[in-house]
Image (cartoon, helix red, strand yellow):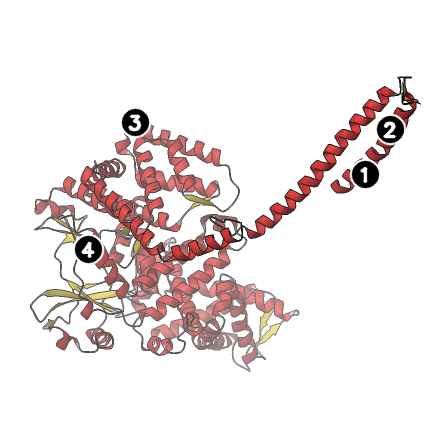
């Protein structure tokens, strides 16, 4: 009741203040009632419209809100104010042009109402106020089996905008002297409910992501993985997104297990703990025992998470695409492409059959390392939304206090972790793409590194692995020119740029890092160097392949783990050393002989596969021989015809050339003979030479004419 009364009073005060200052709209009293009573009625009516009609309008126009990047909210506010004037036509006196003053007045009133709501603590965000688990998501998920569910997306836009508005107003008041008044009003209005209150800004940012739902929690986790570039208080709060998530009821988990595996958990397992021992943004984990006594964990996806996550991702994709249109900075950053990559990875993580396959593949690749353990997956007890895997004991790999108490050799553990990641990225080309401390544990008894959550994995082909290895080697050598050239070879151009300027900027950067570290490459920070290099690449119009970007992100996260374990160890130096060690191990005489045998076997298999083609090829060759034209690789029968034509043309031209030379000789000879007055057979040689000269000149003229015709 206090909330309702204060809401009406705040609306009435906001309207009175706005319309008093705004001169183009006048308010007339209702009947014989005083003007104050009219404002109270207006406040009540405005509250009802905002509570029941405005959400419907926002739901129906959510796509326009996204397309206009929020500017359409002005139109919604104008509609609300217009509706208020229509419901009470005898109260409002709007001067012409009415539509203009309604729009401007609605903006003015909306700002005043928002400020007063913030001061009086109305619409304050509550802890754990996310919308997940509500019954209507399951119903909405059935409306459209396609890729886009417009109704769900519109509802999510409305929820997201409302949640962001609540937190924005709360944070804004924190920077004013009115904080105490707001806290007092929150205690009065939300008795029994916990508000975010006077929590610091980083904590409110974390709570906002939790309130927005799993998609934004995952986004926050990605940001927290770049903890090196964040202030400590922000890093600490965002790291809580890795584990501090409220669980959902066991009844929901049991229903999901039955839907996915066909039987209830009490029949599938010898025992099943109803209370989850861990909860994450997309799932929670229960302990259980198999019928043979094996201790396992059962990962159960949050109910109906797929419908909201897909809607969020589609809305974010649309928003990113709109932002990128016509904005050079957004195109340079390729925010649409980056978001699409993030969305694709999130959707892959929602399918646990994909994660089960990834875990089995990683377990096989890491089998040669005794210091690495990947939990066993039980496919018969796993499905798209449920996964059963071996229970493992361990602590987060960055819990140095626990590691020290257990006597773990942290520098050795750091090098082992680097070796495992280098093998995955550079040798296998199949790597854990999200190795933050929440996904990497350490067994305190066996001192093993445990990889968890293989929902997001990266892939690199052989050429990309070699180029990335070259980049790491150049980093260890502090060779700026080679680093730049390698980066260019790994990139695609998206706009004109100066490559030489990029090379020069990278050389300067490496010189600066070298001076800052006293000339020791071992002190080089891989994340800092590569992030600065990527910024230079964007300025030069270059962009890395998404697979390589994911690999570098994975190595950045690994570097944070290494720093926690051994602050003196450089990721760059250790990685290059591990590459050399692993190359020596893999390319000894026995290994080389094995590679030769394998490649020879592949070549022999290729020959065997081509054997059925030999008779057909031989028949074609015989046909060509019988036609008088042998074709070794291609059918040259048409080419032979063209050669014949060329041959005939060449013969004719050669004959004309020979005739031309003869005529030229006759012309020269007769020209000389005309100067001699000697009798020959009773005829003067001068006269005979003249006749021959005339004939030769005529023939020469004809030959020249034919040659000109042939050329033209």
Tag 3 and tag 2, C-beta contact below 8 Å:
no
Spatial CA distance of label 3 from label 1 is 81 Å
Q: Which residue occupies the foreground of this view, 435 or 75?
A: 435
Q: Nearer the viewer, mark 4 or mark 3?
A: 4
SS for tag 4? helix
Q: Position of residue 254 (x, y in %)?
A: 20, 75
Q: Which residue is mark 1?
A: 705
Q: Which residue is mark 2?
A: 692
Q: Is residue 368 above or below residue 139?
A: above
Q: Nearer the viewer, mark 1 or mark 4?
A: 1
Spatial CA distance of label 2 from label 1 is 20 Å
Q: Position of residue 384 (x, y in %)?
A: 27, 69
Near mark 4 (Cα within 10 A), the count class, few <14, some 14-19 or many ≥20, is some
User: From the viewer's perspective, is 667 left or right of 649?
Assistant: right
Which quadrant of the rendered structure holds the C terminus? top right
List the single residue furthest toward the bottom: 31
Q: Position of residue 383 (x, y in %)?
A: 24, 70
Near mark 1 (Cα within 10 A), the count class, few <14, some 14-19 or many ≥20, is few
> Along the polypeptide, which appears first: circle 3 or circle 1?
3
SS for tag 3? loop
Q: Which residue occupies the foreground of this view, 364 or 314?
A: 364
Spatial CA distance of label 2 from label 4 is 100 Å
Q: Which residue is mark 3?
A: 519
Q: Nearer the viewer, mark 3 or mark 1?
A: 1
Q: Nearer the viewer, mark 3 or mark 2?
A: 2
Q: Which residue is mark 4?
A: 363
């Amino acid at each position: 009741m206090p909330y309702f009364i204060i809401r009406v009073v705040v609306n009435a005060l906001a309207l009175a203040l706005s319309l008093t200052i705004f001169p183009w709209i006048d308010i007339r009293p209702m009947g014989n009632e005083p003007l104050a009573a009219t404002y109270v009625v207006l406040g009540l009516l405005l509250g009802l419209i905002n509570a029941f009609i405005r959400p419907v309008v926002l739901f129906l126009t959510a796509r326009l809100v996204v397309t206009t990047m929020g500017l359409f909210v002005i139109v919604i506010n104008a509609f609300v104010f217009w509706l208020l004037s229509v419901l009470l036509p005898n109260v409002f006196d709007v001067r012409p042009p009415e539509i203009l003053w309604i729009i401007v007045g609605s903006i003015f009133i909306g700002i005043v109402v928002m400020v007063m709501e913030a001061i009086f603590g109305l619409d304050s965000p509550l802890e754990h106020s996310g919308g997940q688990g509500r019954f209507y998501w399951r119903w909405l998920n059935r409306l459209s089996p396609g890729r886009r569910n417009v109704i769900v997306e519109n509802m999510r836009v409305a929820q997201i905008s409302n949640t962001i508005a609540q937190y924005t107003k709360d944070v804004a008041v924190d920077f004013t002297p009115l904080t105490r008044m707001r806290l007092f009003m929150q205690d009065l209005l939300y008795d029994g409910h916990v508000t975010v209150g006077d929590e610091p800004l980083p904590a409110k940012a974390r709570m906002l992501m939790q309130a927005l739902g799993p998609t934004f929690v995952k986004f926050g986790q990605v940001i927290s993985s770049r903890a090196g570039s964040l202030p400590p208080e922000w890093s600490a709060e965002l790291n809580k997104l890795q584990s501090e998530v409220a669980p959902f009821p066991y009844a929901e988990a049991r229903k999901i297990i039955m839907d996915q595996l066909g039987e209830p958990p009490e029949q599938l397992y010898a025992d099943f703990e109803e209370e989850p021992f861990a909860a994450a943004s997309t799932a929670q984990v229960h302990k259980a025992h198999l019928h043979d006594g094996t201790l396992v964990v059962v990962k159960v996806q949050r109910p109906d998470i797929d419908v909201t996550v897909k809607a969020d991702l589609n809305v974010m994709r649309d928003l990113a695409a709109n932002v990128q249109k016509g904005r050079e900075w957004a195109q340079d950053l390729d925010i649409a492409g980056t978001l699409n990559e993030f969305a694709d990875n999130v959707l892959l993580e929602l399918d646990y059959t994909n994660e089960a396959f990834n875990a089995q593949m990683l377990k096989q690749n890491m089998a040669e390392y005794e210091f690495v353990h990947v939990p066993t997956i039980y496919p018969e007890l796993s499905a798209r939304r449920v996964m059963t895997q071996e229970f493992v004991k361990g602590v987060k790999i960055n819990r140095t206090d626990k590691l020290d108490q257990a006597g773990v050799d942290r520098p050795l553990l750091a090098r082992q972790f680097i070796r495992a990641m280098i093998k995955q990225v550079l040798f296998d080309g199949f790597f854990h793409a999200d190795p933050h401390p929440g996904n990497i544990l350490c067994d305190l008894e066996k001192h093993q590194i445990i990889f968890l959550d293989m929902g997001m994995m990266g892939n690199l082909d052989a050429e990309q692995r070699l180029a990335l290895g070259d980049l790491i080697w150049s980093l260890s050598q502090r060779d700026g020119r080679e680093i730049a050239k390698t980066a260019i070879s790994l990139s695609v151009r998206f706009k004109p740029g100066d490559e030489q300027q990029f090379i020069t900027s990278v050389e300067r950067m490496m010189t600066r890092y070298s001076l800052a570290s006293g000339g020791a490459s071992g002190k080089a920070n891989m994340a800092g160097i590569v992030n600065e290099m990527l910024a230079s690449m964007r300025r030069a119009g270059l962009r890395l392949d998404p697979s390589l970007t994911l690999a570098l992100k994975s190595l950045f996260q690994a570097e944070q783990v290494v720093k926690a374990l051994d602050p003196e160890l450089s990721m760059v130096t250790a990685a290059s050393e591990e590459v050399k060690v692993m190359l020596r191990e893999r390319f000894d005489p026995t290994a080389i002989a094995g590679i030769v045998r394998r490649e020879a076997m592949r070549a022999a298999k290729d020959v065997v596969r081509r054997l059925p083609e030999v008779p057909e090829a031989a028949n074609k060759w015989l046909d060509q021989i019988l036609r008088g034209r042998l074709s070794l690789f291609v059918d040259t029968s048409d080419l032979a015809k063209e050669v014949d034509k060329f041959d005939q043309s060449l013969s004719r031209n050669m004959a004309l050339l020979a005739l031309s030379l003869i005529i030229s000789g006759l012309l020269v000879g007769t020209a000389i003979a005309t100067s001699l007055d000697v009798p020959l057979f009773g005829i003067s040689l001068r006269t005979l030479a003249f006749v021959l000269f005339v004939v030769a000149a005529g023939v020469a003229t004809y030959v020249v004419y034919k040659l000109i015709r042939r050329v033209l």
